[in-house]
Amino acid sequence: MKKILSIFLFIMIAKISTAQDEDKGVRFGLTISPQISWMTSSDKGLTGNGSYLGLSYGLLIDILIPKNYAFATGLILSSEGGKLIYNNQTKFNTYGELIFDAGTAVDYRTQYLKIPLTMKLRTNQIGYITYFGQFGLEGGIRIRSKADITNNAGNFIEDKIDFGKDVTIGDVGLLIGGGAEFELTGKTAIHTSLQYCSGFIDATNNPKDFKTKSSLNNLRLQLGVYF
C-alpha cells in the first residue's frame, strides 16, 4: 500500500505542478466523510440484514476543464461494510471444508483504498457559493477485512476474524452526487456534498459450489476544504 500511495502522490504532484504552470487549473484539498454502507443481493441465497457506519478520508484533486467543468479524482481510505444472512448451508474460504448451517450471518467490515474518476459540472459562483453535480466511477482495492459471524440463533461463532479470503480484492461502483462550495478567501473553499455509490461487482468471494453474489453500496456526506 505504501508503494501505491507513493507512486500516486508522485504522479499527482507532477501533474499539479505542470497544470499550475500552464493554466492554474488544478486544485487539491482534504476530506473527511461520515458514511453509511450496506450490502444487497438479488441472490435468493442471501439476505441483506444491516448497515455499517464508517468514515472515509484522504486527498481530493480537481482538474478544471475549463472553469465550469472538472475532472475530480483523489486518493481515499474508506471503511465500509454490511451484514448478510446466508439462507442456505455455506462454506467460507477462511474455514476450509467446514460447512455452516443455513441462517449464518456475517457482519463484514472492510477497508478500501479508493480512487474516484468522476466529472463535476459546476455553476458560476453565486455570491460566495458554487453549486455542482458529480458523476462517474469509484474503484477500490481491499486493504483489510474483518468479520463477525453468528449462527441462526444469534450467538457468536467468531468475532473480528480476518476475513480477507472471502472478500473480493477490488470493488467498482457508479458514483453520483451533488453539493456546494463556499469560498472563504482566494482559492480556499469549504466543500460539502452528498454522494451515493452503487457497487456493480460481487463483493464476496465464496468457495466453488457455494457461490453467492452481493454488492456493496454507500451513502456519504463528503466534507472537505480546497486550498
Image (cartoon, helix red, strand yellow):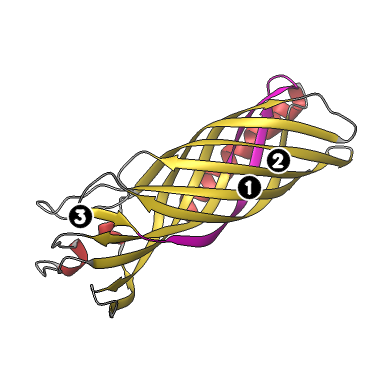
Give the number of the mark in front: 2 or 3: 3
Q: Position of residue 61 (x, y in %)?
A: 65, 38
The residue where tag 2 is placed is 28
Expressed as whole percent of the image width and height from the top left, the position of residue 153 reads 25, 77
Is the residue under label 1 in contact with that under label 2 (CB below 8 Å)?
yes
Q: Quadrant of the N terminus?
A: bottom left
Residue that badge 3 annotates: 206
Q: Residues within 10 Å of mark 1 (few under 14, many from 20)?
A: some
Number of other residues with Cα within 10 Å of mark 3, as a class: few under 14, some 14 to 19, many 20 or more: some
| Stretch of the chain drawn in magenta | 49-74
Q: Residue at x 20, y 55 (%)?
A: 206
Which quarter of the picture shows residue 190?
top right
Instruction: Kindly identify which residue carries mark 1.
Output: 59
Of pointers 2 and 1, the one earlier in the residue sequence: 2
Q: Where is 122 relative to 223, above or below?
A: above
Q: Residue 29, image x and y in percent?
A: 71, 45
79 shown above or below 223: below
The answer to whether 92 appears left or right of 72 in the picture is left
Name the residue located 54 percent from the left edge and 48 percent from the top edge.
Answer: 219
Lower position in the chain sequence, tag 2 or tag 3: 2
**Residue at the far top in the pictured view:** 66
Q: Quadrant of the C terminus?
A: top right
